[in-house]
Amino acid sequence: MDTYLTRAEQAPAPAPEQAQAPAPEEQPGERWEWTGERYGQGMFSHAISDERYRLGLLESVLDGPTRARFTALGLKPGDRVLDVGGGGGSVARWLAEQGAEVTVTDLDTTFLDELTEHGVRVLRHDLYTEDFPPGSFDFVHARYVVLHLPDPDKAIVRLASWLRPGGVLMVEEPASFSVMDSPHPAYRTVMRAFRTHLEQALGSDTGWARTLPVPLEKAGLVDIGFDARFQLVKGRDEEARWWRLNLERSRAAIVAAGLAKDTDFEDAYTELASPGFHDLSLAVITAWGSPKA
């Protein structure tokens, strides 16, 4: 997401006028600078051979609730929707199938470019430093994105500024508290280590989602709503396979930092592969609100 780069010059959907904007000035108590590798680099790079598979596993367990929430919030044909950090593109594709005018962005659009064939405008775009004009969208959506930014609350303000009055900002973010006290010892150990690694390597705020919907209220949004659910993980299911990929990618760094041992990972993989394994995964908190009409 280093520059705007339109990947859909031939797409029928009109692009909002785009202008690069400088990062907002940092105020005391804010953390606007990146402190580690950026999400989309390192262990989440699209260049990793199985990254599309990892994203597909995540889509398989998250897309159902995302679609249901869009429907409940009144998505209709012709709505202008921005999907931020579109990843593998399943949300943007579904939105286009509902008749929405979709813009999808990401730091790396490798997995999104094919969506131009479906009328989706694909942009390489950094929500942290690049703007859309106010009032550009009826919906703005971000999933598993905001917590990885240096100042999630300020990111919410930016996202909300791109909505028309009465539009809807919808964010879906994971919180890790539900895995910290797992009764499965190896799973508990590596999950705690993984959370610490994310915080240290990426600067991710793994507890930020628990503050929702307060950041939307602070951003001046109204008609606030939110819900929460626990993702479940069972031995060998999609969630378990997704976790193994995440854990294996971070394993060397975690072991080197002394956060867990190789044997902890092997024992956790055994638990995750056991047909009798049942536990909680992440809590997913969804919040939405609208600028005053």
Image (cartoon, rainbow, N blue to C red):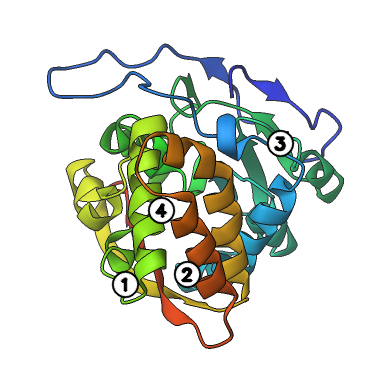
Callout 4: helix, strand or loop? strand
- The amino acid marked with disc number 2 is Arg
User: Which tag, 1 or 4, sits closer to the chain's start?
Assistant: 4
Using the numbered discs, state the Cα–Cα distance from disc 1 to disc 3 in whole angstroms: 40 Å
Q: Is residue 89 above or below residue 97?
A: above
In the depicted view, which residue is nearer to us: 256 or 137?
256
Cα separation, mark 1 vs mark 4, equals 26 Å
Quarter of the image with the N terminus in it? top right
Q: Are marks 2 and 1 in contact (CB under 8 Å)?
A: no
Helix, strand or loop at mark 1: loop
* CB contact under 8 Å: marks 1 and 3: no
Q: Secondary structure at mark 2?
A: helix
**Residue 287 visible somewhere in the drawing:** no
Q: Amino acid at mark 3?
A: Val
Question: What separation in Å lies between label 3 and label 4 (alpha carbons)?
Answer: 20 Å
N-terminal label among 3 and 4: 3
In this rendering, would 190 be left or right of 292? right
Q: Which residue position is annotated with label 4? A: 171
Q: CA distance from mark 4 to mark 2?
A: 11 Å
Residue at x 46% of width, y 73% of height: 72
Mark 2 / mark 1, whichever is N-terminal: 2
Q: Which residue is mark 1?
A: 182
Residue at the spot of label 3: 122
Are circles 1 and 4 on residues that touch, CB within 8 Å? no
**Image spot of residue 116 (x, y percent):** 81, 42
- Quarter of the image holding residue 287? bottom left
Going 43% across and 30% down the picture, which residue do you hit? 134
> Which amino acid type is shown beneath numbered disc 1?
Ser
The residue pinned by badge 2 equals: 69
| Mark 4 vs 2, N-terminal side | 2
Q: Which numbered disc, 1 or 4, marks the residue closer to the eye? A: 1
Q: How many marks?
A: 4
